[in-house]
Amino acid sequence: MKNLLLICAITLFLFACKASSETTNSGPAPVQTFQKIDKDNNGFINKKEANVSPNKVLKKNFKQIDKNKDGRVSLKEYKKHK
Ligand SMILES: [Ca+2]
Ligand SMILES: [Ca+2]
């Protein structure tokens, strides 16, 4: 009887693992891609960083993404664009 309980517990555990890994499987989080593009880690993507990033959309629409027109894209602006 104890074994059955153990098997139940393991099954539940595996199920929980699977569920949590599925939620993280939806591509890289915007925060991670943002941090990759933000080379100097100052929390903003400037035009120069956008130009060298593999994100062509960011490069092309930099002005539109930069909502407050301060010449750099914050994480908030980046997330909104996504
Ligand atoms: Ca930067
Ligand atoms: Ca901005």
Image (spheres, rainbow, N blue to C red):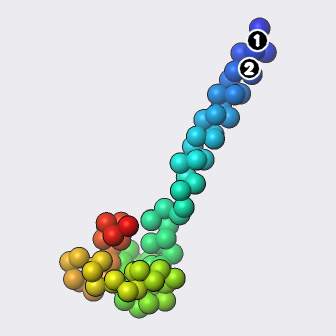
Asked which quadrant contains residue 51, the reply is bottom left
* Camera-side residue of 60 and 33: 60
Amino acid at dot 2? Leu
Q: Position of residue 64 (x, y in %)?
A: 27, 80
Q: Please indicate whether residue 78 sits to the left or right of residue 10 in the image.
A: left
Q: Tell me which residue sits at (79%, 15%) in the image.
A: 3
- Total numbered labels placed on residues in the image: 2
Mark seen at residue 2 = 1
As helix, strand or loop, the secondary structure at mark 2 comes to helix
Vertical relation: 10 (above or below) 48: above
Is residue 39 in view?
A: no
**C-alpha distance separating marks 2 and 1:** 6 Å
Picture quarter with the N terminus: top right
> What residue did someone put label 2 on?
6
As helix, strand or loop, the secondary structure at mark 1 comes to helix
Q: Tell me which residue sits at (69%, 28%) in the image.
A: 11
Q: Position of residue 32 (x, y in %)?
A: 50, 67
Q: Which residue lies furthest to the top in this view?
A: 1
Picture quarter with the C terminus: bottom left
Asked which quadrant contains residue 79, the reply is bottom left
Q: Please indicate whether residue 16 sits to the left or right of residue 79 in the image.
A: right
- Mark 1 is surrounded, within 10 Å at the Cα level, by few (under 14), some (14 to 19) or many (20 or more) other residues, namely few
Vertical relation: 30 (above or below) 1: below
* Camera-side residue of 40 and 58: 58
Q: Position of residue 63 (x, y in %)?
A: 28, 85
Q: Tell me which residue sits at (71%, 27%) in the image.
A: 10
Whether ligand 1 has any atom under 8 Å from the Cβ at mark 2 is answered as no
Q: Please indicate whether residue 24 sits to the left or right of residue 58 in the image.
A: right
Q: Position of residue 46 (x, y in %)?
A: 36, 85
Whether residues under marks 2 and 1 lie with C-beta atoms below 8 angstroms apart, the answer is yes
Q: Please indicate whether residue 8 sits to the left or right of residue 79 in the image.
A: right
Amino acid at dot 1? Lys
